Image: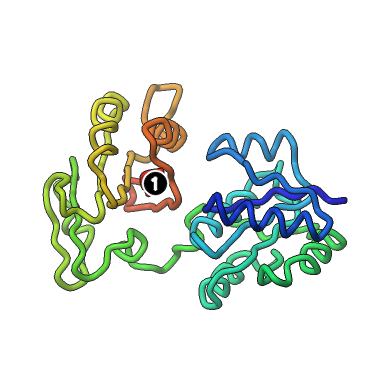
């Protein structure tokens, strides 16, 4: 009996999928923690295979798959994706062609094939941004026509960086009630600590990109991706996308848990 790690973005649906997999003869762990504890747990106790749902958050599932293949400890674990819209699944397949893909109704034979013939040399991308290569910045950030975008502590040249913007996009300095997306640029850990809870509590349905300056070092007390993620998770947010804004800034996209 093979032990699977199931990654799903909806608790109720995860329980249903786990029950389906158990009926098919697998044992399943679906109560996996959020990042970065997820990677530590998969490294410490690797399952026979990892299956990622693409129904709810295909871009998040794709990015996690890229990250799992980048890490030596999880690289050779058979990787499968289940469900999802056809065109979105096709884009994930382009990035991770040696993973297994199936509808949930046909997931058992696909998983058994993956377990029987694990990939010895999986595709490993050098960057977590591989899926976004060639896409305009506004597309990577999720800025859509008519959207109200809040800029918090943004660099002076941010408007030029975002050009060309989709039609009728409105940029505003500071988070407001009508904001649909927030770009927050954080330069120091103290700034993150001071403002994070207030921004998180006032997000409503908006999502927030928290950007930090590249080249930081945790040993110097700089902001880094793990620091940003850990602080935001503690504030009740959860990340699901990463983006390189320009040569100076990277960002993680968060929503309320």
Label 1, secondary structure: give it: strand
Say which residue appears at 74% left-offset and 36% top-offset.
Answer: 45
The answer, for residue 102, to whether it is visible in the render is: yes
Colouring style: rainbow
Relative depth, front residue between 124 and 53: 53
In which image quadrant can residue 197 be found? top left
- Indicate the quadrant containing the C terminus: top left, top right, bottom left or bottom right: top left
Exactly how many numbered labels are in the figure?
A: 1
Relative depth, front residue between 193 and 250: 193
Question: What crowding class fits label 1: few (fewer than 14 Cα within 10 Å), some (14-19), or many (20 or more)?
Answer: many
| Residue 52 image position (x, y, % from top left) | 62, 57
Residue 226 left/right relative to 28: left
Relative depth, front residue between 13 and 144: 13
Say which residue appears at 43% left-offset and 35% top-offset.
Answer: 233
Relative depth, front residue between 222 and 256: 256
As drawn, 54 above or below 128: below
Residue 36 left/right relative to 158: right
| Residue 156 image position (x, y, % from top left) | 14, 47
The answer, for residue 127, to whether it is visible in the render is: no
As drawn, 127 above or below 213: below
Say which residue appears at 81% left-offset and 69% top-offset.
Answer: 109
| Residue 19 image position (x, y, % from top left) | 71, 55
Among all residues in the image, which is located at the extreme bottom?
A: 86
As drawn, 1 above or below 131: above
Residue at mark 1: 252
| Residue 110 image position (x, y, % from top left) | 77, 68
Say which residue appears at 63% left-offset and 64% top-offset.
Answer: 96
């Amino acid at each position: 009996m093979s032990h699977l790690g199931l990654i799903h973005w909806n608790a109720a649906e995860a329980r249903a999928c786990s029950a389906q997999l158990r009926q098919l003869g697998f044992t399943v762990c679906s109560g996996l923690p959020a990042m970065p504890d997820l990677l530590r747990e998969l490294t410490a106790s690797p399952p026979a295979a990892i299956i990622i749902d693409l129904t709810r958050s295909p871009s998040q599932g794709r990015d996690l798959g890229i990250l799992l293949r980048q890490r030596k400890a999880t690289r050779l674990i058979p990787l499968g994706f289940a469900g999802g819209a056809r065109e979105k699944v096709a884009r994930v397949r382009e990035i991770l062609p040696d993973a297994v893909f199936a509808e949930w109704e046909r997931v058992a034979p696909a998983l058994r094939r993956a377990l029987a013939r694990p990939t010895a040399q999986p595709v490993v991308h050098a960057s977590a941004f591989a899926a976004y290569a060639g896409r305009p910045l506004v597309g990577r950030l999720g800025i859509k026509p008519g959207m109200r975008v809040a800029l918090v502590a943004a660099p002076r040249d941010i408007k030029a960086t975002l050009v060309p913007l989709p039609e009728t996009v409105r940029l505003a300095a500071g988070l407001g009630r009508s904001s649909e997306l927030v770009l927050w640029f954080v330069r120091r850990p103290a700034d993150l600590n001071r403002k994070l809870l207030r921004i998180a509590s006032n997000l409503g349905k908006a999502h927030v990109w928290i950007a930090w300056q590249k080249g930081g070092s945790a040993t110097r007390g700089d902001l880094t991706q793990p620091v940003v993620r850990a602080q935001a998770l503690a504030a009740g947010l959860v990340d699901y996308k990463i983006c390189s804004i320009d040569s100076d800034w990277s960002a993680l996209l968060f929503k309320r848990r």
